Amino acid sequence: MMKWKAMGEIHRIADFRARRAARADVPIGAAPFVLEDACPGCGQRRVATMVWRRVSEVALPVPLPRMEPHFLCRGGEVLFQEITDAGIPLSDWSEILGHFEEASSAG
C-alpha cells in the first residue's frame, strides 16, 4: 500500500502560474486597455494587453487580456494576477470600465 506524504505549504501559486503562462504569450497587437479604476489594494494603474495564450497543449491559442502589473492585490499579496483568475464571468467583463490607450507617436 502506498503511503502519502503531506504536501508542503504552497505560497503565491497564482503568481507562479501567471508568470509561467505569460512567458509563452504572443501579443495580438491591439492597443493596451487601461482600466478606469486603479487596483483597490495598491493604487497602481491596471493595463490589459490582448495576447494569444495556450490554455492546453492540444488546444489552439485563445485571445485573453494579460494584466499588468496585476488585477487585484491586498496587503502586498497579489490575489488575482489575471482577470480570468478573478472569478468574474466573461459576460460581466463589459462592466469593467476603461479606455484604449493611444499609441505614442515618435517624431
Image (tube, rainbow, N blue to C red):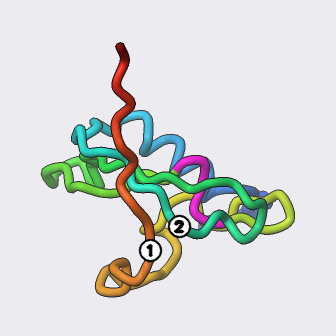
Residue located beneath label 2 in the image: 36
Tally of numbered tags: 2
Tag 2 secondary structure: loop
Mark 1 or mark 2, which is nearer the start of the sequence? 2
Left or right relative to 5: residue 58: left
Q: Main secondary structure of the magenta part?
A: loop
- Residues drawn in magenta: 68-72
Residue 27: x and y, percent? 29, 37
Tag 1 secondary structure: loop
Residue located beneath label 1 in the image: 97
Q: Is residue 85 magenta?
A: no
Give the amino acid type for the residue marked by disc 1 in the picture: Leu
Q: Is residue 69 magenta?
A: yes
Residue found at x 52% / y 74%: 86
Residue 90: x and y, percent? 32, 80
> How far apart are the alpha carbons under marks 2 and 1?
6 Å
Residue found at x 35% / y 13%: 107
Q: Quadrant of the N terminus?
A: bottom right
Q: Mark 2 packing: few (<14 Cα in 10 Å), some, or many (20+)? A: few
In terms of image quadrants, where is residue 33? bottom left
Residues under numbered marks 2 and 1 in contact, where contact means CB atoms less than 8 Å apart: yes
Left or right relative to 6: residue 25: left
Residue 15: x and y, percent? 62, 52
Residue found at x 64% / y 66%: 72
